[in-house]
Image (cartoon, coloured by chain):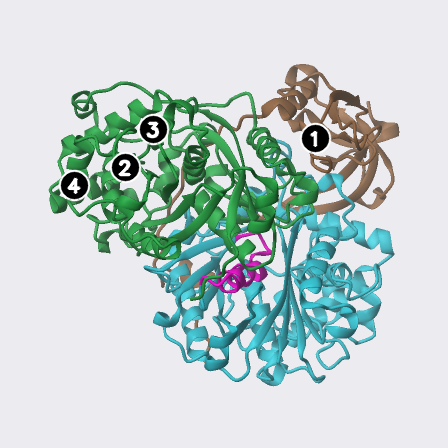
Chain colours: A brown, B cyan, C green
Amino acid sequence: MVYSGIGISPQDVANSRYLTVPYSANLRYRWSTGAAVGRFLAELKNGKIVGRKCDKCKRVLVPPRMFCERDFIQTSKWVYVQDAGIVDTYSISYIAADASRLEKPLIVAVIRLDGTGEAGILHILGGIEPKDVMIGMRVKAVWKPKRRRVGAITDIRYFAPAGDAK
Amino acid sequence: MTRRVAIVGAGMTLFRRRLLETGKELCFEASRAALDSANLDASDIEAVVLGSAPDAFDGLHMKGEYLLDGAGASNKPYTRVYVGGGTGVFTPIAAWWHVASGLFDVCLAVCEEKMSPLYPHPQKAFWSIFDHTLERPLGVNLVWIFALEMRRYMHKYSISEEDIAQVAVKNKRNALDHPCAQLADRITVDDVMKSEPIVWPVKKLDISPPSDGAAAVILASEEVARKITKDPVWIDGVGWNLDSTYWTNRELAYPQYLENAARMAYRMAKVENPRKEIDVAEVYDPFDYKELHHLEGLQLAERGKAAKLTSSGATERNGEFPVNPSGGLLGVGNPIAAAGMMKICELFWQLRGEAGKRQVKRDARTGLAQAWGDLMQFSSVVVLRSR
Amino acid sequence: MIFMTDKVAIVGLGYSGFSPSTDRVSYKEMMFEAAVKAYRDAGIDARKDVQSFICCTEDFWEGNSIADEYMPDQLGGALRPVCTVAADGLYGVITAFMQIRAGLVDIAVVESHSKLSDVVSKDDIARFAIDPLFGVRNLDPNPSFLAGLEMNRFLHETGNSRESCAEVASKNLKNATSNPRASYGSKKSPKEILSSDVLAYPLTKLEASKPADGCVVLVLASESRARSLAEQPVWITGVGWCSESPWIEGRDMSSAGYASTSCRMAYKMAGIKDPGKELDLAEIDDTFSYKELQHMEALDLCGRGESGRLVERGFTARDGVLPVNPSGGSLGLGYMAEATGLHRILEASLQLQGRARKMQVKDAKRALVQSWRGIPTASGAVVVLEGGP
């Protein structure tokens, strides 16, 4: 059996040994946030985290949705949850989204928010060195100043060890 | 009543970081190799199913439409399916129902991935798999979430980075015998531990980097399969399952969706005791910890015990339960959908005794292939049998 | 090829949206609404009864790579077999049909949606589907130039007139005025249509469908389940699909070969010999006015070059001999990307169930549904539907 394919190196491409066709696509969207995420973002602007409660399984869903995926019914009401919780898992990123190296590593975590049962959100940790992070540690949101909040997940700058949060 | 369906031919291209061939050409090369292996011509193919993961790599909208002539699908019923990283093992499942439904007798299943066109790095495409409102603004990259899952898995079952690194060592070594391999190497656990951190606990040698490649198989109904070959490899069980998008709301230490997919396939294949009945497994290993995680979800190892199984040597190619004798994604390479299909090809060769230097020592009659994808939420499983 | 006797039926229909924009809901919320309605219509519990969920979409219409990640929750599909077909909704129907006929599942759900109002650079994305290497992508920022090329060749080869194309647009826009789901219903004379701005010569603006949002969810079942679930199941008696070459320059632009090949497969399966006589209505692709004519001919609803005259004589009007797009089609409802095929299934099914109200076609027993995947493809699918016991 003969396996086909001609491997080429980055140098081959850089030296124009093989031709390439450059193209930048214009991909623009304006996503409707909808009822659930729209309200969630608006509340972030107020410095609050809001979820939706399912009456059947009693979970408070964050990120919020108008439906419970387990029971397949509408969620019934808005519930504010704490902007604090515990680190469910974490990792330390040495690369950016395009795989380039970061100067300073970023600590990434899933944080289980108090008062939700099991809901976690993805965010970054700050005010702590990578070596000191532990699964199960308590953290609290550090918000941007009110005037700089725009209704985005980045209105929370990061989560910091609970004792240090302002 | 379901018709029996068999694989009668398989083929693949080299897997490389960058191949000169276009996506169309890769589809052609893999399809042609599969046709040749079964002594068939394009005119014998009644329908074509193509699998490929995100369009963003190729820089094309509706890339299935672009690739179709390379897959020999012009003027034929043709469909592209995708389920993220699970696509490679899902595509033959889709081809299976083309034949099992009675609509066709011979169907070609092709998987292609050309990740290199995206500049400066294919990783950027993965940014757009994340939630546009809640996750992308954080600057997320693909490895984040797998590192989070790996860390959670290590924590829950007290597994060390060294335990996990054994998988990379085994698979890269197995790949030394694979003529298409991109990442074959003889390395040690220490090499893995000392490789540069990408997103800790994931280090450079824990992960399978981007790749170009294609792989294909041909499926036929029982009657036709027996005319094409004396050694058809039967697709006896298929299963797939998708968990909630809200991955931050889930327990990441155990892949429940995979258990569901496996049980679906086992029920269909009448596998009652998978650990005893499966002779060889090709499980999805884009990261070394995933092989362990998946063995547990597949009920092929007890929860938290797959690392021990690996240390015992059981999963070596010559062990009592060979896992990824091909070299897997860690060794052969990871052109996403094509990598999953490569596992189907490997089992086709293993179960026919045609795997050459990679042939497992034990008598292998029942094999399992599995792939995994999306936001750590999807798995596809196929159970194959010779005779 | 063998055909099994086990039949497959549509037993539940649900939809939401059907508007040029749906700013107040996310695509997930739009899908949830359609799904709830479909499951209620079928009388099933999605979490208990459905064994397979099939979504039809393309990444760049969603703005999400690996868009299938975002589908399960709002359909009741979390921790269930869910997959994505990168194609028009009819391919999803055919996928469910095959899964059921293979004996793999009893009840399957098919979903597709359009949220084109979220897509700002629609033309750029449509153009992004054109071959990247040969420069055609950069010929014209407006991808409709491909429709103009095809229309010109079609008219030239078949002798159909521009006036007939305008007649199609006029009919469909008018039909849409009695469809509650239609966004673009209006009374426009062929003359007004011909004198509207030129989009890509000879195609005018009023001859091209405009975008709409919407979601359609269907529940399909095996014969035994269908009989216990639905009083009026809609049987899928024939399916076919086909792709021609992706090389635009190499195709015969005058004929829709993909539609001809698809319909031959579907008609054979459904036992149809003379489609023009045996079908009671057709919901077929009319993304552009000339496409309806081209497809009528490709689908053997009439001879080559005859479609224009038939339309002008009212043969395809809602009260004509063979109503074509009595719903108003894409020209009247709006273009719904990959959801287009399912909206046609929805309209045809309501006709066969006698639930089409003001649009009802008399004695509708057998319908043809056909879709095309749009510029720059030559791919599409056909489904034959039948009402009755």
Residue type, numbered disc 1: Ile
Q: Which mark is residue A73?
A: 1
Q: Which mark is residue C152?
A: 4
- Mark 2–mark 3 CB contact (< 8 Å): no
Seen from the viewer's position, the closer of residues C256 and C226 is C226
Give the Cα distance between marks 1 and 3.
Answer: 34 Å
Which residue is at a point 78% across and 27% down the rendered structure image?
A55
Residues at discs 1 and 2 both on one chain: no
Query: Which mark is nearer the camera, 4 or 1?
Result: 1
Q: Is residue C71 visible?
A: no
First in sequence: mark 2 vs mark 4: 4
Write the start and end of the magenta stretch as one range. Answer: B82-103
Instruction: Give coordinates of residue C130: x percent, y percent.
Output: 33, 47
Instruction: Give coordinates of residue C206: x percent, y percent.
Output: 26, 26
Give the Cα distance between marks 2 and 3.
Answer: 14 Å
For label 2, the residue is C322
Residue type, numbered disc 2: Leu
Q: Chain of mark 4?
A: C
Magenta-colored stretch includes residue B222: no
Q: Chain of mark 3?
A: C
Circle 3: element type: loop
Query: Which mark is nearer the camera, 2 or 3?
Result: 2
Residue type, numbered disc 4: Asn
- Mark 3–mark 4 CB contact (< 8 Å): no
For label 3, the residue is C328
Q: Quadrant of the N terminus of chain C?
A: bottom left
